[in-house]
Image (cartoon, rainbow, N blue to C red):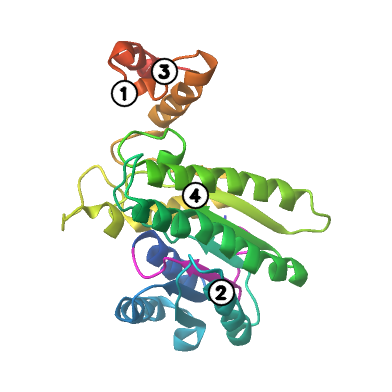
Amino acid sequence: MNHPALTPGAVAVVTGGASGIGLAAAKKFASLGLRVCIADLGADRLARAREAVVAVAKGGDADVMASETDVGRVEALVALEDAVTATFGGTNILMNNAGIGPRSTVLGPRESWARTLEVNLFGVIHGTQVFVPRMLERGLSGLVINTGSKQGITTPPGNPAYNVSKAGVKVFTEALEHELRNTPGCQIRAHLLIPGFVFTELTASGRTEKPAGAWTPEQTIDFMLERLGQNDFYILCPDNEVPRALDERRILWAAGDIVENRPPLSRWHPDFAEAFKTFASAKK
């Protein structure tokens, strides 16, 4: 069952729409008869992505637009919203999906921290604050889908800037849904997409073939639509390596660091390795 906002003629805006999960979402929306705007950086990438979306769009070329947009700049998102309104009349579905993952440590580099937070976190904040007011004014059924990450929940060591950005997306999206559901007459709902291991430009790390453990972007979007139909807020995606049950144990263990007063990131602390292994294998 599709969400009521996913109806033919509705308008979907997807940032980071030129590849990966964003492109898979844009193609799926177009195949369902929605009009679609993909926003990303790189004119050539956008042109190729638009062709791929047009090829499956029920309405053909007229139902697909593309915009070169830096989501880290609020003025760019204002221009995007104006362009979508001028072309399609407004937005029903906003998918704040653009994301990057340059390497970082706690101590730097500053440029990686600044750009990661600018795109991954403020891109979501800006996109929401620019698009949602007009979506509310229209009084129609709508969706805001923000792409988070399991790294924003269990925060594994390795790339703290990315983890911080995605933790911020989680908290922001939770607050957004709370405000929307307490707004009288509001028919817009927010959802947090939490992908598993997905083979995309961001995760490829030089590989050209999908690892056996990874899902495709298309599998991720099919799962997302299934769970939207069930009105899940937290769309926690499995993959071919990690089932939901293991994700749940990892999430509970991470929260337990506070409750049990363990060292932070104790899952990766040698003194707790056996305890976590036992916890992860236990049934709830």
- Give how far across and how far down residue 4 sits, in percent: 65, 61
Are there few (<14), some (14-19), or many (20+) residues within 10 Å of tag 4? many
Q: State the CA–CA distance, disc 1 to disc 4.
A: 25 Å
Outermost residue, right side: 184
Whether 18 is among the magenta residues is yes
- Give how far across and how far down residue 209 sits, in percent: 16, 55
Q: Which residue is mark 2?
A: 75
Q: Is residue 147 visible?
A: yes
Question: What is the number of the mark on residue 193?
Answer: 4
Q: Which mark is nearer the camera, 1 or 4? A: 1
Sequence-first tag of 1 and 4: 4
Amino acid type indicated by mark 1: Trp
Q: State the CA–CA distance, disc 4 to disc 2.
A: 25 Å
Sequence-first tag of 4 and 2: 2
Q: Residue at x 41, y 27 (%)?
A: 250
Q: State the CA–CA distance, disc 4 to disc 3.
A: 29 Å
Nearest the viewer among 32 and 21 is 21
Q: Pointers 4 and 2 in contact (CB under 8 A)?
A: no
Is residue 239 placed above or below 112 in the rendered structure? above
Are there few (<14), some (14-19), or many (20+) residues within 10 Å of tag 2? some
Sequence-first tag of 3 and 2: 2
> What range of the chain is rendered magenta?
2-19
Q: Is residue 33 visible?
A: no
Horizontally, is 229 left or right of 41 in the view?
right
Amino acid type indicated by mark 2: Glu
Q: Which mark is nearer the camera, 1 or 3? A: 3
Q: Residue at x 33, y 76 (%)?
A: 42
Sequence-first tag of 1 and 2: 2
Horizontally, is 39 left or right of 8 in the view?
left
- Give how far across and how far down residue 243 sits, in percent: 37, 33
